[in-house]
Image (cartoon, rainbow, N blue to C red):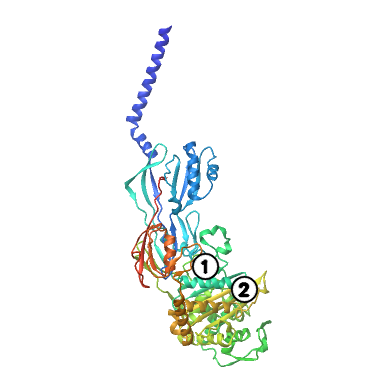
Amino acid sequence: MNNSRALLVITLIMIISIIIVIRLVNIQVIEKEKYAQLAEQQQTSIEKIKAEFGLIYDRNNNLLVYNRNDVTFYLDLNITKEDDKKEIAEKFSKAIGKSADYYLSLMKKSKGTIVLQNKVQPSQLEKLTDLNYNGLYSVPDPTRVYHYGSLASHILGFVNKQQKFVSGVSEFFSKDLEGIEGYRKVYKNSLGKIVSFDESEMQAPVPGNNIILTVDRRYQLILEEELKSGLEQFRAQSATGIIMNPNTGEILALSNMDDYDPNFYWQYDDFQRRNRAITDTYEPGSTFKPFTFAALIDKDLCSLNEKIFLENGSYKFQKVTIRDVKPYSFLTAEDVIINSSNIGIAKLVQRIKDDDYYKFLRSLGFGNLTSIQIKGESAGKLKKPTNWSATSKAFISFGYEISVTPIQLITAFSALINGGVLYQPQLVLRKLDNNGDLIEEFKPKPVRKIISESTSSLMRKILADVVVKGTAKQASLEFISIGGKTGTSQKLVDGSYSKSHYNTSFIGFFPVEDPQLIILIHFNSPQLGKYGGLVAAPVFKKVAERIIEKDFNTFEKYVNDKYKQRILYSNFHQLQNKSSESLLNKNETKLSVSRVMPNLINHPLSEAISIMNRLGINYKIKGSGIVVDQSISPGSKVSDKELCFIECNSVQIIGASQR
């Protein structure tokens, strides 16, 4: 009996041994390649390396948008030791500032992978050392930083949580800014932690291209501050402003108030994030009259001095009554524009054929896209003559029955005053690679000739008189010539024109003899004041005055001698009274006023930018993260024209594996 049992056991052992041998032969010989491949797949993987986004600068090389090399930490609770959890919590508590209990509460799950800490910044990473724990790993999680918060937010756009560009020039030039992803082969241990890299199978990422905008940061700041102040003063629903070079189409500033901060875009609603300067349309009112008058003058259909009967303020036309704000009996054709007579321009426009008038307005870009370098633009509305009623042409002549965007209006107005050429609006000057080498330069794009130079010269003179003796007196500056036109239009509310909601605007330029800037100011439904001359024109004046003072060298030859002396004296007085230190924002360190190059090595890029901006040092950035090199040695004196090249590198994470 015992022998039988022993024989059975031996037989079973032999059978099992044979099965094991057959299995081993199958694994090691017959299916060797299959299992070797599976083992390699478990122990190796190809890891993508995301490219750094390109940087965005203003026209004077002030850095507006850059990348911060944040990381996010994950914890795999399946392989994390219980004894390590308290240590991990305490280390993150000291580095981040949250309580250790906060992190311990996150670890209460029995299994799975948790996000231990989102968006750990480089300065915080320096405090996280000796993080060699099973299950703890980090992944790069770069943050797009908008250095000046909400400044130029509608121009710049933002990056969403999926790392996709949304709106603004960022979306329009997303392919340029994104760069090209790289990859590397990584080796892992049995716990899934990365232990080494194979440098022979690695492709470095190519950083995105950098973009130089047409925008001037100084102009942008002034425009935003004055729009915000006007919004509060006149209690309007919203406001829009655009500053453009009328001779090139370059946009120097563009703002919508209420706006948003791209760093925290999710805290704002769609209205705040929408670029209303290109998407929202409105009936422009009297700012449209100069286009009608220019068509008549250019086609020699009226003369400046001919008398127009204005019906004493009330005109019955095709069973519809057209009214003026002030009653006039007779005015010259020129005074019709200067005093903004609806009746006068409605009578004059009847001299031009419907098709000719439509083609002229269409040639100015109305009813069509301007092709600005931002997506989402609206074409506005300009009906074809076949769809006009008996009164349509009259109402279009003074800015009703037509809808425009602010960008369309300022672009077309520029053609009236620059000699007659319509330019495509432009937001980007240049594209550069990561080394600062030129890839593409965007030249001004003339679209077509609209009116003759003589007509344009005449329009400048008439628009100057609008400011001197017409409806825009509050836009006047004593030291430089200003031209422009006010506009006030009733808003359509529930299908009828409201008597309490208005679009209030002013579009002006200077100097009249050689226009360098054109500025559009528009307020939506101001509660205090409704006319463009009382609301928008004073805001224009403040913007223009501050720009001329800030950028005096550009406008010096156009201002009168009395103002020059005042500015020169003011600048001299300021230099005499400058303290040895400049006052900085409460969160920033005090810096020496003398233009001596500071030591920026090991400073985060954001701090370096702030320091150089405060000192007025011109710079160019390569890379992002921490400053590792600077072309001007610390302690050296820096001239106004010198350019400091700053090189940055990503921060390395100490003691934490990445995957």
Q: Is residue 408 left or right of residue 6?
A: right
Q: How many marks?
A: 2
> Where's residue 515, x and y in %?
47, 82
Q: Find residue 377 and name its label.
A: 1
Q: Is residue 516 above or below residue 16?
A: below
> Where's residue 590, x and y in %?
46, 65
Q: Residue at x 57, y 61 (%)?
A: 270
Q: Is residue 69 visible?
A: yes
**Going by the picture, which residue comes out furthest to the left?**
200
**Which is nearer the eye, 194 or 129?**
129
Examine the image and state in which quarter residue 285 appears.
bottom right
Q: Amino acid at mark 2?
A: Gln
Q: Is residue 405 visible?
A: no
Identify the image quadrant of the C terminus. top left
> Where's residue 302, x and y in %?
55, 89
Element on which disc 1 rests: loop
**Going by the picture, which residue comes out furthest to the top?**
1
Q: Residues within 10 Å of mark 1 (few under 14, many from 20)?
A: many
Q: Amino acid at mark 1?
A: Glu
Q: Find residue 233 and name its label.
A: 2
